[in-house]
Image (cartoon, rainbow, N blue to C red):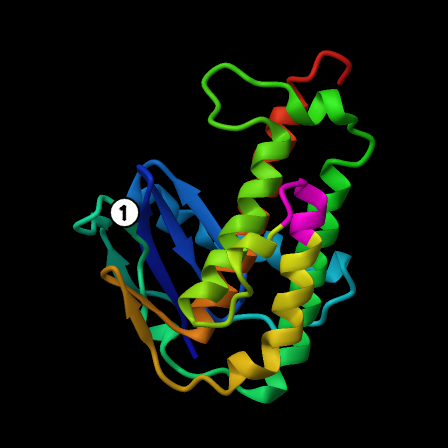
Amino acid sequence: MPYLVCVEENEGRWIAHVPDLPGCFVQHAHLEQAIQAVPEAVEVYIAWCEGHGLRITGLSDPMIVAEVIRTWESEDGYEVNAFFASDRPPLVEDELPQFERLLTATRKDLMAVVDGLGAEDLAREFPGERWAIGGVLMHVARAEWWYLDRMGLAFSSAELPDEPFKGLTKVREYLLAKLPELAKRRGVVTLTGETWSARKVLRRALWHERDHRDHIEKLRSKLPQW
C-alpha cells in the first residue's frame, strides 16, 4: 500500500507531513524540495522512534502526495493552518497509548535540548529572532493550550503559568489527561476560518514541539559558552 503525504504552506515555508507517522514531517522553502525530502525524513523518524523505544511499522512505496494546501489569512489577519482529509477521522481509543508515548518522547527531547541552561541563557535575545529560548518554550506551551481551546477542552487562560517550565508541564499534563475525551470528539470545529479536529490537535502538538526543539538547538549553539 502507498503512503500519503500532505503538504501545507506555513510562514513562508512548505511542511510535508506523513499522516501515518504522527509527528513525521520535513520542511523546506520550496515545495518540490520538501516533497523530495520526505523519504529521508521517514527514515529519520523511524530511527528516532526506535531511539525512544517506540515500535512502528514501516511504510511501503510508493509515496503519494494527497494534498497541497496554500496558506491564507482570516479576516482578523490570522494565518490559517491547513486541515487535511487525514485530520478528519476520529481518534480510535486503541491509538491513545501510542500518542501518549510519542508526546512523552517529544517532551523528553525538548527538555534535553535546554538541559543545563541557566536563567541568563533562557533570557538571552538573539538578533533577528522573535523570542529568547525561554520565550520559545512559553510559545510551545501557549500553542498547545490554544490547540485544546479550539476543541473546547482547555482550562482558563488565566491559569496558564507565566514561567515556561511550569507552563509546559501544566498544559502537557492536561493534554494527556484529556486524550480519552479527545477520542470521543467525532466531529470537527471551525473557528475564525480554521477547521480543527482531535486528530489535528495531536498532529500539530507533535509537529510543533519537534519543530521548536530543533529551533532551540540552533539558538543554543549561538550562546557564548556553547
The quadrant the N terminus occupies is bottom left
Percent position (x, y) of residue 10?
A: 33, 45
Is the residue 111 above or below the residue 179 in the image? above
Q: Quadrant of the C terminus?
A: top right
Q: Visible in this render: residue 153?
A: yes
Residue extending farthest to the right is 116
- Please say whether residue 47 is visible from this viewpoint: no
Callout 1, which amino acid?
Tyr
Crowd tier of the residue under label 1, counting other residues whose Cα lies within 10 Å: few below 14, some 14–19, many 20 or above: few
- Residue 182, percent from left and from top: 52, 79
For the record, the magenta segment spans 161-168
Q: Relative to 220, does residue 170 appear above or below in the rendering?
A: below
Splitting the image into 4 quarters, where does residue 90 fall?
Answer: bottom left
Counting from the top left corner in percent of width and height, residue 206 is at 56, 58
Answer left or right for 97 relative to 214.
right
Q: Is residue 114 left or right of residue 38?
A: right
For image coordinates 39% across by 53% down, the residue present is 16
For label 1, the residue is 78
